[in-house]
Image: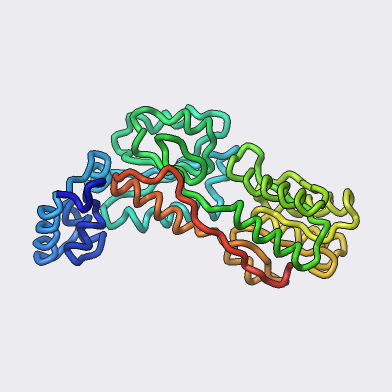
Amino acid sequence: MTTAAHRPATLEDVARVAGVSRSTASRVIAGTGFASPAAREVVTAAVDQLGYVPNPAARALVRGGGVRLVVAVLGTSAAVLDDPYVHQVVGSAARVCTPGGVGVALHWLPFGDPRSLDQLDGDRSVCGAILVNTTEELLEAVPRSLRGRVASIGVGSATVPSFDVDNAAGSEAVLRHLYASGRRRIAMVTGPRWLPCAQRPVQTYRRLMAEAGLPERILPGDFRAARGRTAAGEALRRWPDIDAIYAISDDTALGVIAGLRDAGARVPGDVAVAGFDDIPLAGMTAPALTTASHPVGRIAVAAATALLDGRPAAPVTLFPSALVARASA
């Protein structure tokens, strides 16, 4: 029996029918961790009723005993592992995996060497991987043995589902807010050019500037505050009439504010500043940073859950991003 003619029963279906949490159902089915006799009875009955059968990847993920879900992060140096964004992905994945007795490991993938994924190939303790900062080249390099057990936070492919924020819509909301506040000479500080997801806000910026008949003023960025500080000085030198700067990461935007202050420019009096991500610090700066939301935790939970359950995911799952208007713009 299935819950519907078009799909097999999932772990969520078992938990719902049994009237228990997903983690309890997972522990009973996996035979790991504590579960009361009553919980075991109702979960077992639900499994029988629904005909629930975990696929091989899901069974491997929940069996415990050293099993690891790997968060594999592409970056130009190992410093990418120190990024708070990456830490949030790992922490959120751990909240999903821990009840099933699954560990979460962090792995650096050196940019320019997609074969580094081969280190995970054949490792029997690795039952799945979440790719972060994914590129097309990295997707092409996913070992055959891992296909079906990989999810991407970023771009995906026919065999690797994508979970990501709709940063194009979030960027549009920020840019339209700047325009509505009277800003017309708006510059953008981008993210790394090699990162596909960082190009969506650039495309949005170019489209909106063209629609409004405004000039493009684009400076390269790398998501770091230091680059934002330098970019602010470059913007003032190249475009002395600038009245707004949009950086596609909050860290960069905070660096922009510092750089503007270095040059004696007032924020937002002379130049409005906005970012993207809504990191905790964004609301505590002076002035507080206008930005757009980025539900990193929800995205990572969705990616880890899809792998843990072993069920097919939609090719692309985009999470909404909304304007968070504050004093800086």
Front in this rendered view, residue 187 or 116: 187
How many numbered marks appear? 0
Q: In this view, does 106 lie to the left or right of 145?
A: right
Q: In this view, does 82 lie to the left or right of 13?
A: right
Give the quadrant of the C terminus: bottom right
Position of residue 285 relative to residue 46, above or below, is: below
Percent from the top left, x then y, of residue 72?
46, 41
Question: To which quarter of the image does residue 186 belong?
Answer: bottom right
The residue depicted at 39 percent of the width and 39 percent of the height is 150
Front in this rendered view, residue 3 or 61: 3
Percent from the top left, x then y, of residue 71?
43, 45
Residue 38 in view (yes/no):
yes
Percent from the top left, x then y, of residue 244?
79, 60
Front in this rendered view, residue 69 or 193: 193
Position of residue 7 relative to residue 115, above or below, is: below
Percent from the top left, x then y, of residue 195?
60, 40
Q: In this view, does 21 lie to the left or right of 105?
A: left
State the colouring used for the structure image.
Answer: rainbow
The residue depicted at 78 percent of the width and 64 percent of the height is 272
Q: In this view, does 211 lie to the left or right of 89?
A: right
The residue depicted at 68 percent of the width and 46 percent of the height is 202
The residue depicted at 51 percent of the width and 29 percent of the height is 114
Residue 64 in view (yes/no):
no
